[in-house]
Image (cartoon, rainbow, N blue to C red):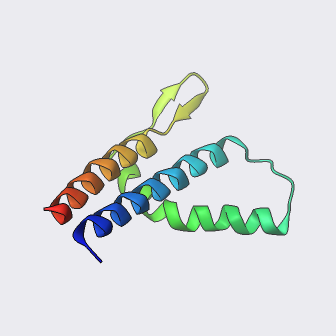
Amino acid sequence: MSRASIADYVNTLVTVYVVLIFARIVMSWFTNIPYNRVLDAVLGFVRDVTDPYLNLFRRFVPTVRVGPGALDLSPMVATFALLIVGNLVAGLIRG
């Protein structure tokens, strides 16, 4: 296995995690989803995988008040941080 293929693997993992964060954002918009065992398992997986990472940023990034609701900016900051660090790591692996 070459260094380039390991770097490509790291980039793929970062992309998959970004997609999971996006799925978590979409999940937060639809809170009244009818119960389905398979869907519940998928949503639980997405929650379990993304929430520990997002909670790191929720400690430092305050929610923004928008009218009667609030806007959580932590997924956006977490995604930018993940993309930057992922590209740095992949670049270091490539050499």
Query: Looking at the image, which residue is at 22% across and 60% down?
Result: 89
Q: Quadrant of the C terminus?
A: bottom left
Most foreground residue, 73 or 4: 4
Q: Quadrant of the N terminus?
A: bottom left
Seen in the picture, residue 83 relative to 35 is either above or below; the reply is above
- Residue at the bottom extreme of this rendering: 1
Q: Quadrant of residue 26?
A: top right
Point out the residue furthest to the left here: 95
Q: Residue at x 60, y 62 (%)?
A: 46
Residue 94 position, x and y percent, is 19, 62
Residue at x 44%, y 55% (from the top left corner)? 54
Q: Quadrant of residue 38?
A: bottom right
**Residue 34, percent from left and from top:** 86, 54
Residue 31: % across, % down: 73, 47
Task: Judge by depth and name the residue closer to the eye, 37 or 59.
Answer: 37
Judge from the rendering whether residue 5 lies leftward or rightward of residue 42; answer left or right: left
Q: Nearer the viewer, residue 35 or 3?
A: 3
Q: Residue shown at 33%/49% (left/top)?
A: 83
Does residue 64 appear left or right of residue 67 in this picture? left
Residues 2 and 47: in front is 2
Q: Looking at the rendering, which quadrant does residue 13 occupy? A: bottom left
